[in-house]
Image: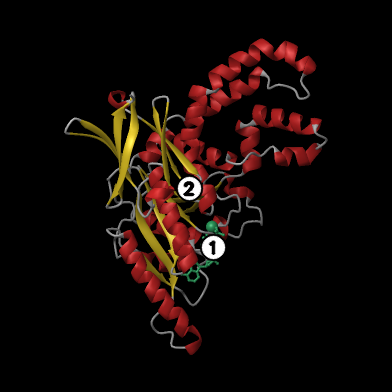
Amino acid sequence: MRILLFCGKGGVGKTSLAAATGVRLAELGKRTLVMSVDPAHSLADSFDIGAGLFHGQTADPYRISENLDIQEVNIQREIKKHWTEISTYITSILRTTGISGVEAEELAILPGMEELSAMMYVNQYRREGRYDVMILDCAPTAESLRFVSMPTTLDWYMKHVFPFQRTVMKAVRPLANRISPVELPPDTYFGNMLDLFKKLEGIDVLLEDPRITSVRLVTNAERMVLRETQRAYVYFSLHGLTVDGILVNRVLPEQISDPFFQEWRVSQQQILQEMDAYFAPLQPRRVPLFTHEVSGLERLRELSKVLYAEGEDPSLVTRTERPYRFEKIDGRYEVHLTMPFAAKGEIGLFKKADELVVEVGTLRRHIGLPTSMAALSPARARLTDRTLIIEMKETP
Ligand SMILES: Nc1ncnc2c1ncn2[C@@H]1O[C@H](COP(=O)(O)OP(=O)(O)OP(=O)(O)O)[C@@H](O)[C@H]1O
Ligand SMILES: [Mg+2]
């Protein structure tokens, strides 16, 4: 089973390329699901299924053709299904602040709920063995990073905070509810959290296994888009995910000779060259700008033929190198982190309990250390050839 994440900046063509990839896989006989994780769904539009504006039909897998389903996670429905206790509690708190009714319910949709709901489906379908490939059409980069960091964050919360909080709450609730300005979470809230956690169990392992999950970064040949793509590459690596493809969409075709586009052509060529160098050994694939929108099964098929060679299987595993690994070299312990493009100054390292914490920019990653290294602390770090090598030493 494979999970392919299509990620990138807003509007670059994630949905179109994810959909076209689904079309190809289904043609190869693979049972394929394309799932939209972006709350602003446009997958049904991409397939032009003639659904209503708000796509009620695609909240469950919707059959497009033999072997191909699409699904658009409907957060209102998911809340009723999985998040009742949590959102009821948050709604009740919001009410005490004067926000009422529908507005409170809207606000009780926490950031990340869509992503978690999508992951529950991925986990469920995997257990059922329902699909050979699940393609996730992600929200623009910032949100999709939340998507991948969510399981580890939740895992951390469930291990470190949750048991403590629940016990404390049990003890203080009767008293505190009389004096606290807001109601404290009832025990059902914790029960709900625990249920959710069980539904997500194991998903972090799936996401970090390069033989199962690969990230495909969709980009355009423009400076700003390239920079965001590079950042995304670093962040995904930091979160233990493997990027195995860069797809450059909307490249101006050779035959455009209009002088208006001359400057665009030149700058695109330059950026394409930079991309080849940056992402090596990955070879960015180029997709031309079409003369028309890519909408409907026929056009998606056309796109899939440009994107992949005849008979090529986009779900093949082409990269199995893990973004980080532990080494023991001459008695020294080291953590090797794949760190494409990150400058050393931007990286922060420290130790928290038995975890190594790595910070790049505003993102933070907890790396659970193996027992042999759990007592060690980061001593030195050096950046060599896209790998950050962190030397671990005994704390004096
Ligand atoms: N190579 C292409 N040539 C012409 N039109 C394209 C191409 N790729 C995508 N489009 C069109 O561009 C528009 C945006 O594409 P798409 O919805 O796939 O982007 P997205 O990255 O998913 O956007 P969002 O961030 O809003 O989800 C669509 O109308 C699509 O048909
Ligand atoms: Mg989209």
Secondary structure state at the residue bearing disc 1: loop
Q: Residue 184 appears at what percent x and percent y?
A: 71, 21
Dot 2 alpha-carbon crowd within 10 angstroms: few under 14, some 14 to 19, many 20 or more: few
Give me the disc on residue 11. 1
- Marks 2 and 1: which is nearer the front? 2
- Tell how many labels: 2
The residue shown at (46%, 34%) is 152
Of the image marks 2 and 1, the number of the one nearer the N terminus: 1
User: Taking 31 as reference, is 186 left or right?
Assistant: right
Percent across and percent down for residue 364 are: 47, 40
The numbered mark at residue 292 is: none
Q: Nearer the viewer, residue 267 or 373?
A: 373
Which residue corresponds to mark 2? 361
Tell me which image quadrant ligand 2 sits in. bottom right
Which of 225/29 is in front? 225
| Up-down relation of residue 104 to residue 43 (above or below) | above
Which residue is rendered at x = 40% and y = 29% of the image? 355
